Image (cartoon, rainbow, N blue to C red):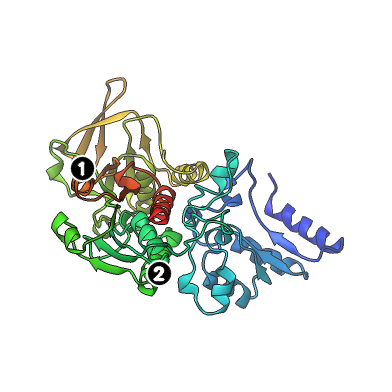
Amino acid sequence: ETTLDESLKYCKLAEEAGFDMLDVDAGSTDNEVMYFYPTCHLGETPLAKYTKIVKQTVDIPVAAVGGYIHPEQAERMIANGDADLVFLGRPLLADPQWPKKARTGRADEIRPCIQCLERCVDNISAGKRLGCAVNPRCGFESYVYPEKAREVKKVVVIGAGPGGISAALTASQRGHQVVLFEQEEEIGGQLKYASKESYKYGLRLYVKYLKRQLELSDVTCRLGCSATLEKIREEEPDAVILATGARQKHLEIPGMELVPHYTVEDDFLENIAAGDRVVLIGAGMIGCEAALELTRKGVHTSLIEMTDSVAKGSSSVNRISILRALEEENVPIYTRTQSNHMEMSGEGPMLVCSTAKGAEKRISCDKLIVAIGSYKVTDLEKDIQDHYYEYYTIGDCVSIGRVADAVEQGFYAAMRI
């Protein structure tokens, strides 16, 4: 492992050897991989502090790299004299027009990298083609694009999550007349809940980007409007795209009324304070990220997981990153543990659990959060099938998946209309 002092010596040697510029990076695919492909858990531009030190050490140009999602981050580095230029990697996969949009004052139109690593790093590691979760055209830009449809149709899209919005925008770009239904007052679907943590900068930018794209489009948005068969039929659509997504599962535990309890769809961050003792039931990626956020706010957090797998369902690098972060924060994780009931003791509320070996475990618990996964919302599917010849079902309401799956399915559904 190379220390910072050793690295600075190498930088000076490179300068003396006649190098024209230094690119300040960290980590490797074998060691500290979460720095090599900076994850959101490390905070914004986590390598900036090292770039600044190198800039103060040498007199040749120094380049910054690592998580520069928004032009403001790059401008800040250069304006402060901490770097001479900024390199972009994953952000250009998400939006190849990133530099042009930044230069022309359209930063709010940049499709941001969400640091998920699903279709870029994971694909490369698996020997697949390079891709991007939020850009379904990545790698196919020259021959896959929303060309104008031969026949203009009326298209109804139900659900304004990432899949539904991808479908609505693509259909509109192709010249179709699009109406987008969303029962909530805000767009985003599950992204609204997945972007709550303070370190989810890229995901929050992505939701803002989607909102801006809808504003710039010809899509008619009906927010706060639950789509019923009657309302859909009033639009007289030629095609319907069902993107109703998923909702968080609930869990009933005897005695849980003793403490405030939430799912990750609730405003739990606003109702939990430093010093609270919180148990998160479910150590998937959503539960782990919520636990990390709470712990960093001074909350005493514990994770309970029925299986022996923690942070599953995420990219390999992000899984390594969140597990390392939880370890550094000393968050206790109890795997193969079943939550049985809540009871009051002399020490306050307790969650009583049992281990795989049948032993009883009691955990102090002031508040409870349930993060045990999602279920598909398919209430309208049968009616759509019965009344419309051309219909498409995409995203989580087909199979619980990732952002990349929903965006890609929405794009190609609209391309077929």
Q: What element carries label 2?
A: helix
Type of amino acid at the residue the image marks with label 1: His
Residue 24: % across, % down: 68, 59
Q: Residue 213, labelled with which disc?
A: 2
Residue annotated with mark 1: 250
Q: Horizontal placement of 256 versus 272: left or right? A: left
Residue 123 found in image quarter: top right
Q: Where is residue 401 in the image (x, y as percent from the top left)?
A: 38, 44
Residue in the image at 23% along x and 43% along y: 249
Q: Which residue is drawn at 78% across and 55% down?
A: 10
Among numbered discs 2 and 1, the one appearing first in the sequence: 2
Q: Percent from the top left, x then y, of residue 48?
A: 60, 63
Quadrant including the C terminus: bottom left
**Relative to 399, is 99 above or below?**
below
Question: Residue at coordinates 27% horizontally, 52% vertically from top-left?
Answer: 244
Judged left or right of residue 352, residue 87 is right
Alpha carbons under labels 2 and 1: distance apart: 33 Å
Q: Specify whether residue 197 is in view.
A: no
